Image: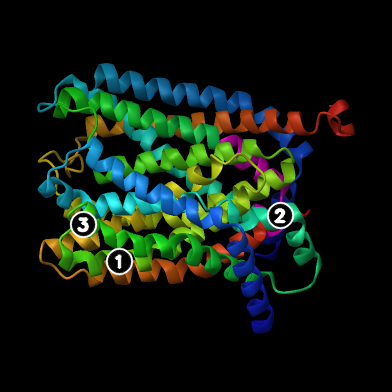
Amino acid sequence: MTRLAKRIFYKELVSYKKRSSTYLSPIVFFLITIALYPLALSNDPADLAFLAPGITWICVLLSTLLSIQNIFNEDFEDGSLDIFFSLRVSTLSLVIVKILVNWIFSSLPIIILSSTVVFLLFLPSESLVILLTSLLIGTPVISLFGALAGALSLGKSSILGPAIVLPLSLPILILGTSAVSSFLNGENPSFYFLMMLAIFIFLLPLICYACIGALRLHYE
Amino acid sequence: MNKTFNNLKTFYHKLGSSPWFYKISGITIPYVALFSFLFLSIGIVWGVFFSPTDFKQGDVYRIIYMHVPAASVSQAIYYTMTVAAVVSMIWRMKMAGIFIKSMAPIGASFTFLALISGSIWGQPTWGTWWIWDARLTSTLVLFIFYIAIISLYSSFSEKKSADQAVSILTLVGAVNLPIIKKSVDWWNTLHQPASIKFTESSSISPEMLYPLIISIFGFYLVVLLSGLMAMRAEIAKREINKEWFKNY
């Protein structure tokens, strides 16, 4: 199982490297949406600093939506998923590795990039660590939901994915932004981190099996 | 004991058969319609015309006889859909899929009714149509879930996979709804917004409570009625070419 997982991992890395648009477009989207907020709301540093955690979280959430269609679609279209499901190999490792690679390519660059909000949105620099930690813990859950939505809406209209992911990821958005704002209020944010971690651990097996079930629907 | 269990088992198996359901629902629908009309009219008429006026809110409060039943029904429908989703996932029962497909639009409309009647109630009483209160927010999320389920169903052309996909989404939603509710509660205590509180615990007097209970019961009967009719229509749609349907 681990050997298989490793092979899928390398295969996924190579295929993501070849299609640079899949990981570049979320980055571009993230930067543009971050730039939209000061233009639309105000350029006052005090206002922006107050809104920065929320804006950053919303932008991260929306940019990860761009990549959910890519998680399974490529393999679905070229038939490799078909082969996977007809072979008697562990589909669980396939799903987990695919979610992991998708997170590495679509969420991780955005998380690293989001440290620029210290300059762009005047986020107090001492709370940057808290924001990055909340993103690091929270985005895997969003990737899980994204994978489920991608699996359910394979080959369907692309509006279906966001309609599934966004309501499901409300708790993560609330907890993630609450962590930063509670830190800015001088409280200890560890409660929110632990809560997000608990949600991740609770949902990981559930969503993975739901993904397998959803993928199987297309091969019945 | 064993006999009752066996009876339950045969009942469960019968429940999975669409001809049986089609026949039984055809017989029961008139009675359910009669009783839902009775309960609903007694509840609403008693509530609107004969129950005492609230000394704080005046006559506006009478929308409670619409709002509370709709809100209670909107959540109950999701719970029943969750049970059907489990049945559909484990035993692949055809009727469970038909149930989810037929109940989702009904649930969505009652959730919408709860939201609308709540804001019509809120305007004259608390001076605002909408507030980002914990309960309102989670009802709105419930509404979005219903819409997502309906749109996911309509995106599949194959009924069987549509049923399974919708069951998966319903289950994941059911697991998530308590988390959403809890996190919205935390969020609400963190951003203590206005002094308006919808969740004020106040004891309701019996003269107001009895029509409310009757009206809630009437709403459940209406849901049962519309559910039976929608499921019947769905069975007819799916099995129009089957032999039993042609001979019905």
Residue A185 shown left or right of residue B13 in the figure: left
Which amino acid is tagged 3? Phe
The amino acid at mark 1 is: Leu
Is residue A207 a member of the stretch shown in magenta?
Answer: no
Q: Mark 2 points at which residue?
A: A76
* Residue A63 image position (x, y, % from top left): 43, 51
Q: Residues within 10 Å of mark 2 (few under 14, many from 20)?
A: some
Badge 1 element:
helix
Q: Quadrant of residue B54?
A: top left
Rendered residue at 27%/34% (across/down): B209
* Residue at 71% from the left image edge and 34% from the top image edge: B24
Where is residue A66 shown, x and y percent of the image? 50, 49
The N terminus of chain A - image quarter: bottom right
Q: How crowded is mark 3: few (under 14 residues within 10 Å), some or many (20 or more)?
A: few
Measured Cα–Cα span from mark 1 to mark 2: 33 Å
In this rendered view, identify the residue nearer to me: A105 or B170.
A105
Q: Is residue A112 above or below residue B133?
A: below
Residues drawn in magenta: B88-103
Q: Name the residue under label 3.
A: A119
State which chain disc 3 sits on: A
Letter of the chain that mark 1 sits on in the rendering: A
The label nearer to you, 3 versus 1, is: 3
